Image (spheres, rainbow, N blue to C red):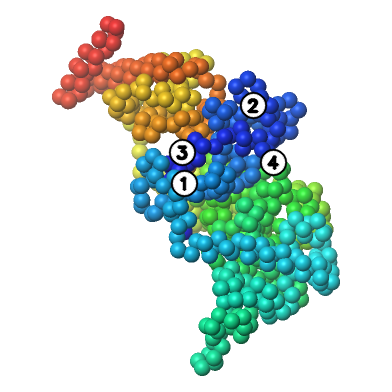
Amino acid sequence: MAGRIPQAFIDELIARADIVEIIGARVPLKRAGREYKACCPFHDEKTPSFWVSPDKQFYHCFGCGVHGTALGFLMEYDRLPFPEAVEDLATRLGLTVPREAPGSAAAAQPGAGAGTGGGAAGAPGAEETAALYPLLAKVAQFYAQQLQRSERARAYAQQRGLQPDTMERFGIGYAADSWNEVLRRFGASARDQSALLAAGLIIERERTEGSGTGNSSGNSSGSDRYYDRFRDRLMFPIRDTRGRVIAFGGRVLGSGEPKYLNSPETALFHKGKELYGLYETRLARKPLKRLLVVEGYMDVVRLHQAGLTDAVATLGTATTAEHLHRAFRLVNEVVFCFDGDRAGRAAAWRALLQALPEARAGRELRFLFLPDGEDPDSLVGRDGPERFGARLDDALPLSEYLVAQLAEQADVAHADGKAHFVALAKPLLEKVTPGVYRELLLDRIAAAAGLPSERLQQWLDPAGSRPAAPVARNPPTATRTVGRGSLVTQAITLLLHFPAAVGAVSDAQQRQLAQMSQPGVAVLVALLSQLGANAAGTMAQTLERWRERPEYRRLCELGASKPLVHDEAAARQELSQAVARLLDLELRRRLELLIEKARAQTLDEAEKQELQALTVAQSRVGGH
């Protein structure tokens, strides 16, 4: 597996990219002073509210609130996961994306590996792996041609309700009822046969001792050694997020088994990561607010044909954590759709177990169960997209589905059943990331069990019920400047808009700030440290360093806000004053805390010395 992309390379990529050029290739921009404007591509509007800043390398819509960097735009508009967006932008700039070896610290140095052919790009077999893309594309085209030549295959597709334009959009084809059609056309040499094998298109025959079927001479008689994997099947090309064919799924036309057959795992295809239809969903160009995860290729194709273009499918495997990671990079809502039979409910429970660690505030996970004997393919064909959409609106939230499943296993009408219910819930709650969502889920489970949520929390986490440490009765309140946010917010905003202003804060002041516990100070200290060690030329560079951190969204919001000042000199002055004021307030807070404690009890020697030092320092500040 390829390693992480070095942050130094991301810095260089953002420094070289021109956000105006990237967005302008997709959206008609008009110059407006030093910036550019357009009607937002992410929501319908008649008056332009979408602005692009070449100085900040940042975009923002004042209508719907979307904002981000050049990479963020590619992810949002082209619906690319982050690694693919980096690859896409690097290709445009003529750069090769390097990868860090596990545990490597080299990429932490500015410019390390950027633009080189290191990492995965230089790994053994990389050229052979890259050559599989054009091979798979040619085979997909061949399958599409075979569909046009087979009246039987076309009749089957028509009987399944597939329209010609839909089949063309998904690249659907047909694998002839032959043991060597692909092998004969694309496996002329031993090297070609090796490529077909690596792409999962042919299978090596089992050889018995002394059979003499081995073909090491490199001639073209590969049919003695290999045979086609896919035969007499409707073929569904599986594409990556850049639209490249990486594998196939085949649906048998008759009553043979298996009904569906997928490509095996290859250097290009990992079924636990890919979602069928994601590329086509990205091409739909509709505002993507959710993903509907179904189980089959035909389900996806029929739903897209009906206008429900947010449908994707797992590829012959249960939902994995990687599937969910990919989904939540694109949307905040995922709806799982399963058949209502026993197998469908078992698959839904497995999906829930994978989804629990991904559940958190701001995300929505829901479950839709279809009537017995129905699947999305048949149901949307019978009822139409409107009625199917209404079913989606009634899908069960994760919390309700979880409680319903637990209630089937434990009767909460009596104490024994309640205890069993809670015991079943405990390992599930432990999978959920601590935070607001976990607290709300705990409340819902407590209500279902007929227990006070505090009692349930105490039982699940006895250490969490300890009383909080006392706080001073009169802490300083002058931590806000009206209309500009807290002093911490002001300092962070100044650094985002003017990264070079970092020089206004000394190392000693940074160390003092690091001792503070005020909300947001840790982010401010991290920003100061980052920018001091590796200067950023634009806001976009600064923001990209925080993409994987939970504070990223809030920093983007601050980046989209109106600058507090209009030049770097003023930013330095404002930042210096904000930090000085923060440290002064912290001095006063600590002084008041010690005075408060001295009134209630005796201070130890260290606290007495600190109180004396703080009193002297406060008098000096007051004297100024």
Name the spot of residue 398 as percent of width and height, x first. 59, 49
- Mark-to-mark CA distance, 1 and 2: 30 Å
Mark linked to residue 36: 2
State the residue position of label 1. Answer: 115
In this rendering, the answer to whether 50 lies above or below 130 is above
Q: Nearer the viewer, mark 4 or mark 2?
A: 2
Residue 507: image quadrant is top left
Q: Position of residue 172 (x, y in %)?
A: 74, 63
Q: Amino acid at mark 2?
A: Tyr
> Can you say whether 241 is above or below 225 in the image?
above
Looking at this rendering, what residue extends furthest in the left direction? 605
Q: Residue at x 76, y 73 (%)?
A: 253
Label whose residue precedes the other's in the sequence (1 or 2): 2
Closer to us: 511 or 347: 511
Q: Which one is earlier in the sequence, the residue at label 1 or at label 3? A: 3
| Residue 442 in picture, x, y percent from top left | 50, 45
Which kind of residue does numbered mark 3 sit on? Asp
Say whether marks 4 and 2 touch (CB < 8 Å). no
* Mark linked to residue 448: none
Residue 376 seen in the current view: no
- What kind of residue is marked 1? Gly
- Of labels 4 and 2, earlier in sequence is 2
Query: Which of the 4 image quarters holds residue 597?
Result: top left
Q: Label 1 vs label 4: CA separation?
A: 34 Å
| Mark nearer the viewer, 1 or 2 | 1
Residue at image coords 73%, 58%: 170
Query: In x, y percent, where is residue 608?
Result: 18, 21
Residue on which the image places disc 3: 11
* Circle 4: residue type: Pro
Of the residues tagged 1 and 3, which is closer to the observer?
1
Residue indicated by mark 4: 287
Task: Count residues near mark 4 (Cα–Cα under 10 Å), then give few for <14, some for 14-19, many for 20+.
Answer: some
